[in-house]
Amino acid sequence: MTGFAAYLVFFLIVALTYSIVVMGLNIQWGYTGLFNAGVVGFFAIGAYGTAILVGPDRAHLIGGFGLPFPLAVLGGMALCALAALIVGLATLRLREEYLAIATFGIAISIQLVALNFESLTGGAQGLVGLPRPLFGLFDSPAGYNLFYLGVVAVMAGLVYWALETAVRSPWGRLLKAVREDETAARSLGRNPARVRLEVFVLGCVLMGLAGGLYVGFIGYVSPLDFLPILTFQIWAMLIVGGSGNNRGAIVGAVGVWALWAMSGLAISRFLPVAYQSQGGAIQVILIGLLIVLTLIFRPRGLIGEAESVSKHAD
Amino acid sequence: MSALLDVQDVVAGYKPDLPIIHGLSLTVAPQEMVTIIGPNGAGKSTLIKALAGVLTVSSGMVRLEGRDITNLPTHRMAEASMAYVPQVANVFTTLTINENLLVGASSLPKSEAKTRIERGYEAFPDLKRYRDKKAGVLSGGQRQMLAVARALLTGPRLLMLDEPSAGLSPLMVSEVFERLKALVEDGVAILMVEQNAKAALAISHRTYVFAEGRNRIDGPSAALVEDPEVTSIYLGAGGRKR
Amino acid sequence: MLQAIADGILSGSIIALGAIGLTLTMGILRFANFAHAELVTWGAYMALGVLSLTGAFMGPLAPFSFGVPLLMATLVAMVATALLALAIDWLVYRPLRGRANHLTLVFGSFGVSLLVRMVILLLFGGAAQYYSNTLQIAMKVAPGLRIMPDQIFTLGLTAVIVVALHLFLQKTRLGLSMRALAENPELARVNGIDTRHVVRWTWIIGASLAAIAGVLYGLTVQLRPEIGFHLLLPLFAAAILGGVGNVFGAVIGGLIVGLAESISVLFIPAGYKLAVPFMILLLVLYIRPTGIFAGTVGGGKS
């Protein structure tokens, strides 16, 4: 494989992993109107949970259960569900913004745990040398990456299919009712707070799944992969794709990640070393502008115009 | 007789594309008490909120003393010499009685506000006794009185009330209604939405009956009391056979 | 322990100043403004910018580490921060206000917070900076308790501002309008209050207080572009703990959060200090979501 093709495979694995996160956020915000300001926290819980469960036994570390990869990912997802329940139970019966504040808080707290709880998370170094699923079956890393791309693509496809089925089911129709009219939801015989909790946990579990897949691919976890900016990037992917639209979520993930990668490349290639950090700031400013401007001028997303929420939910 | 308030074919609702009232018209003459009755969902409260500027009028015309006030911002109603008392949440419960009145007088110069509030206390001595208590401790009837006293501070020629009897005991209702009658004698015209058709017809000069966002019947209240159609609108929810 | 309490009261009073502005905007404008803490950072850096332009041509006012220039710079920073808040309101929040889902405003503020932080980083760089290089000698107040004069100044200023704001809200027409608007916007308009005017003043007051909090933070800790990011959770915790819309509550909430953070270090590793506000927030939301003092806009669904 040429360098470019290898990079493309690498790029697509990461982008499709993020697309699962975006779809998790989409069911929360796009369909149900729940604002999650701590996406990166749930992604990190899934990743660290998987890493701790899958990792080999090491003297200086707690954990090291050496579980099979799929079980470890399920464990990471379960941890995500637990975290989502703690935040959701506290806030989902209150004013909507309390969920936003609490999710922001959990993301900060997870970051602190990742950095400071060294005997569990490896601290700033993270956990390295994690087994990658079925890695031994492949002769070359390139072949393995191609295989892993297939795994992630299948998972993203499964999540897409499951969500599309879910939002078209009677349960999915409830979501719109919950979002737009409390009384209507009640008249359907469901407690809106309960439905919100279900959606919130489901979305966070998907973020955890993506975190697990991410770890399986890169073979280590480090706090640097879970910086707060990731939450903004995921939001940009969602809003560019058009919230309430799962296909747009995937396209937005690939598109925004491509823009991010290319602008990063351009900065490192063309900006003098002295200005690199400013270049990084400008890159982030572009993400911020993308979010705010899309929100103001194209609230239905840059590419998700045709398939709006109501079309799905009606 | 030239009308004080002249409402022509007003269309309005809570969402721009979903009108609840479809072209309502009515007039109120100076010193007249007019009531609006009708079954639930007739658009009574929607109309009065549209007139008060709380909801947007999407088509039609509202004139007060000959001046076009359609979609005047809510906070400028006072200068158009009308006042509005909403239903239920009609006082600031976290503010004292005196502060409630001060808020009601915010469009007046300070010294003027002070004299008018003193005059208000003379008219409603009960309120003066509680002036530094939080309005949240008042009973439903006392709140209604405070809301009316507040609305009168700016010296309106037209007072609009949304179901002033809601949630009040029968004794309190008659007390409130006596007050309103006295106001009309003092020269204020009143336009009032009322759930209780009997009470409304008994107190007012004229009555409009709405159903499903449209005018159905109107005329002198005394004549409508005996009108079988009025009863049928209530019983048949629109007067149509279903 | 004594030192931890003193430090906690100090950082608590800075949190309190920021939380007052946040609780006012949450109560009156009715949305959780994620960009509020960035106004604190903005204020701190604006003062630094003014200082670096005017230079320290006057010596410090003993015993403090700063002099008249910093006080002037603070005034300029308050104006600059108020202008930024008004500009954001006009450019971002105004077009979003009419949207069916009011969380769109929260979303917008979330994006704005990132923008403001990055613009500061771009303008001033990421390294820690200080208003003055003079080292202050801490005074030994009691055994095991050292306090710097600047810290006393911070406490005193906070107390003065809280009292002044209380009088403003209780005694002036504008203050009364703000309280009325916080309880019931529709009734406030019906009462003849021009809500746009009140909203403007809410921004000006909230942003000015944020700027002061930023300067005091820069004076007693240091200036970093992440000040706001790290303060956001403490501010929210303080505002919600004190009851949203309740100025006095925000002050008490700020002091509690500051004290809890500083005392926690005696029991848990310092690295987890930033998670303390989150724990307080969760506790409040589980036990008493309206806050200790019922706010004007309670925790219940409106």
Image (tube, rainbow, N blue to C red):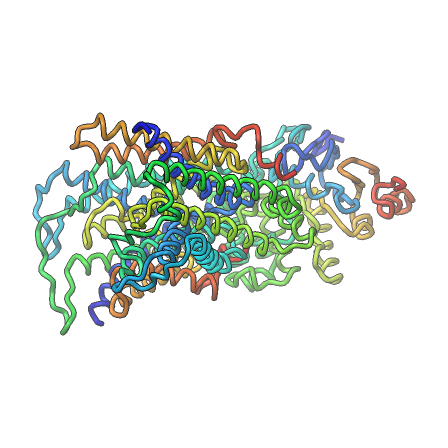
Q: Indicate the quadrant where residue C164 lies.
A: bottom left
In the rendered view, does B224 fall on the left or right side of A3?
right
Which residue in the rendered view is the most extreme toward the top? A270
> What residue sits 79% from the left and 35% below the top?
B215
In the rendered view, does C197 fall on the left or right side of B141?
left
Q: Position of residue C284 (x, y in %)?
A: 44, 63
Q: Nearer the viewer, residue A264 or A125?
A: A125
Q: Position of residue C121 (x, y in %)?
A: 24, 39
Q: Nearer the viewer, residue B237 or B38?
A: B237
Q: Position of residue A227 (x, y in %)?
A: 32, 46
Q: Indicate the quadrant where residue C3 lies.
A: bottom left
> What residue sits 41% from the left and 53% below the top?
A69
Residue A280 appearing in the image: yes
Q: Is residue B9 above or below residue C278?
A: above
Q: Nearer the viewer, residue B158 or A224?
A: A224
Q: Position of residue B172 (x, y in %)?
A: 71, 61
Q: Indicate the quadrant where residue B143 lies.
A: bottom right
In the rendered view, does B188 fall on the left or right side of C263?
right
Report the number of numbered marks.
Answer: 0
In the rendered view, does B74 fall on the left or right side of C227?
right
* Quarter of the image that includes the N terminus of chain C: bottom left
> What residue sits 33% from the left and 29% below the top?
A1
> What residue sits 75% from the left and 49% below the top?
B194
